[in-house]
Image (tube, helix red, strand yellow):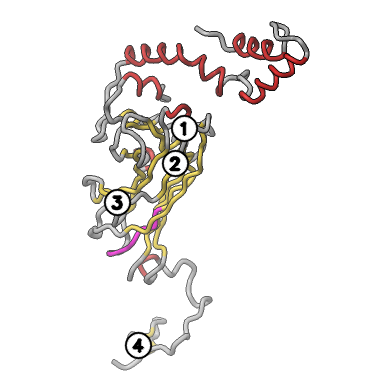
Amino acid sequence: MKYDIDAIFKAYPGIDICIEDGVGVFDKDHNPITLDQAKIDAARVELDKLKYQTDRTTDGEVIYDSWRSQLAMLYDDMIAGKLDTTGTWATHIKAVKDANPKP
Amino acid sequence: MPVAINGSGTVTGVSVGGLPDGIVDADTLANSAAAPLKRGSGSTLQTVITENTVGSIAATGDTIHAVTSLETSITPLKANSKFLLTLSGVNGHCNMIGSTGNHGARYFFYVSVAGGSYANAATHSDPLCATHIQGDLGNWLDFPVKYSYLASPSYSLGQSLTFRPQFTKDNSMGNSFTYYFNHNTQSNRAIMMVSEVAQS
């Protein structure tokens, strides 16, 4: 069995636990812990609400370019007189937001 | 006792060390004749391996957590042997995106004698391996983890020894952060190897 590690850690804060895929979840004395799936599901919902942020910056297939590249886009748009929604920078930002919508 | 050559095909009366040095060559020995119990100090007597696609193994707090799936048992063939422990194929993990945790982990070997409680297999409390990342690099990294140790547990002949890896948080990381023994990004196979090394 594969565990939702991040959700378990969020559902059970402040205690020492160890999660082994396919084996079990244990306390600090290596005694098995019985998990409350409802608590884990609720934690997963909360984590998913925040997921769009990392999807836009690191984890998604379409992510923000570096700040240096974005400044270069803005400069090029400025020189080209395209500091509007058709410019390189605005198009890039929109593509990332569209690919990773805020829940 | 006089040396006698018997009609049954046996020679009797030869004392220990009574043959000239070097008289027995490799061809004279039968295959596999040098059984483990006949091997001397420094010889490998037996090797036991546990391998597993361990999946993700992660933890919180300052406990030195156990890795159950790599427990490896061995029953020594000789007294006072040492045990060469090797762990490989582990995908360590560090993540400090936004300083949110997963800075790294410290790795150990623990041993249980005859089903007793587990204790550090080393003669010191220092980790045998560690991963660490310092500062927000904007992403996470996985590191190959491989370490060895020559352990000298106390045991009696007939008792079984069980070795396993254990891990805990990075030295400089807060208890509320999470850390990984293995990060399951590669479906990698971890291998725990225990070899008995004769001391006499």
**In the image, which disc is placed on residue B125?**
3
SS state under label 1: strand
SS state under label 2: strand
Q: Position of residue B71 (x, y in %)?
A: 35, 43
Say which label, 3 or 2, has the lower sequence index. Answer: 3
**Residue A24 falls left or right of residue A50:** left
Measured Cα–Cα span from mark 3 to mark 1: 25 Å
Chain for disc number 2: B
Q: Amino acid at mark 4?
A: Val
Image depth: mark 4 or mark 3 in front: 3
Measured Cα–Cα span from mark 1 to mark 2: 9 Å
Label 2 belongs to which residue?
A: B132
Say which label, 1 or 4, has the lower sequence index. Answer: 4
Say which label, 2 or 4, has the lower sequence index. Answer: 4
Label 4 belongs to which residue?
A: B14
Dots 1 and 4: beta carbons under 8 Å? Answer: no
Q: Residue at x 38, y 19 (%)?
A: A7
Q: Is residue A97 placed above or below B180 in the rendered structure?
A: above
Chain for disc number 4: B
**Residue A66 falls left or right of residue B112:** right
Work out whether disc 1 and disc 4 sit on a shared chain.
Answer: yes
**Residue A66 falls left or right of residue B134:** right
SS state under label 3: loop
Residue range corresponding to the magenta coloring: B80-85
Say which label, 4 or 3, has the lower sequence index. Answer: 4
Measured Cα–Cα span from mark 2 to mark 4: 64 Å
Dots 3 and 1: beta carbons under 8 Å? Answer: no
Q: Amino acid at mark 1?
A: Asn
Label 1 belongs to which residue?
A: B95
Q: Position of residue B64 (x, y in %)?
A: 30, 40
